[in-house]
Amino acid sequence: MRFFLFISVLFFSACSENEASFVIDDIKQLTYDGDNGEAYFNADASKVIFQSKRDDNECDKLFSVNLDGTQLAAFSEQDGAYTCAYYSLDDTYLFYASTLHLGEKCPEIYKDPNPRKYIWPLRPFEIFRTSENETIALTDTPNGYNAEATIHPLEEKIIFTSLRDGDINLYEMNYDGSDLKQITSEYGYDGGAFYSPDGTQIVWRAWYPSTEEERIQWAENLEKRYIESVPLNIYIADRDGSNKKQITNNQATNWAPSWLPDGKHIIFSSNMDDWREDYQAYGSNFELYVINIESLKIQRITFNQTFDSFPVVAIDKRILNVLKSFSLPIEMPKIRGKLISLLGIFTPIENMSQ
């Protein structure tokens, strides 16, 4: 199984505001080695920071690369495991989750005895901030989980996921870790949040157990420190968590949502079209979709026999950056319309012999 970074453009055409159409084209590969994921742009969208398992490392480290694929560079900090790195508004800081406070080694993680069961291990991450002069910890939750930090588009604020009070919820804090506010509180999983382009709303993925069996399942996940692939749905809300609205409603795993620049559409990843009769469950072929947050109309925009995910938007560029698997579709849909100002990233998974 290998992961590669790709860059692409997203085209948009519309006869009216309610008939938007999106097409991905001009895909270019950025990385050629290691397992790479969760790439996010710097302030001027000239490069990305991403996590990669390569060079015989047992867990992910951080790397940056220019959008033309040049100047691949390892991050200065190397102890422990890393995930979810994000630049500050002016590139002064890099925020990321890491176990560097625990030493050089990669922490032990839970491995399910069922090899077909896909789980996300919850390492004891803390969120750090690195500048030219120093690295400091912004969170301190022993044996907790603090990760998935993204930044507000206008203010020096961070939204992140945390396991600190017996459940996984969304929190907001300042760049220095002060003014901590809890955003969500419903029992279950909340994660992967992004602010809207104007900073007034958020989007995230969530699963809220509704039966006693599901509550037992979630309690076991928390005890063993992992999240299994459950029927995740996409939610939006005001920035403080009020006026919450569920915008997907199926039994598939819908995740990795982020905003398009118009603030009216969400791009996300889902396996909703990969129902497996042989397993009586949804499969591992995740595709990318765009949903209108008002009409809830969904358009599928990738058509690969593989895994595409983690789209993110850089508002000030007219590029869509895609984290994608090595295999590309033989034919792409015809482009009809103009390029909109958006940048995103897509992550795929595929079993490969090379």
Image (cartoon, grey):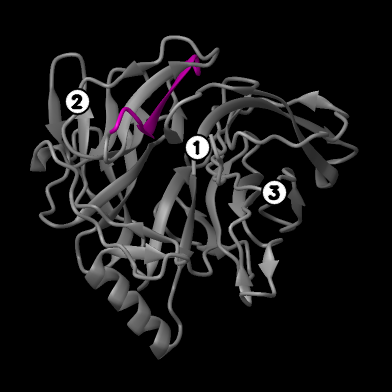
* Nearest the eye: 226 or 343: 226
| Image x and y of residue 1, in percent | 49, 44
Residue at figure coordinates x 52%, y 32% from the top left: 4
C-alpha distance separating marks 3 and 1 = 14 Å
Looking at the rendering, which quadrant does residue 319 occupy? top right
When the figure is inspected, residue 9 is found, relative to residue 202, above or below; the finding is above
Q: Residue furthest bottom?
A: 212
2 or 1: tag closer to the N-terminus: 1
Residue under numbered circle 2? 77
Q: Crowding near pointer 1: few (<14 within 10 Å), some, many (20+)? A: many
Amino acid type, mark 1: Phe
Which numbered disc, 3 or 2, marks the residue closer to the eye?
A: 3
Residue at figure coordinates x 88%, y 29% from the top left: 336
Q: In what element is the residue under mark 3?
A: loop
Q: Which residues are magenta?
A: 44-56
Q: Is residue 52 magenta?
A: yes
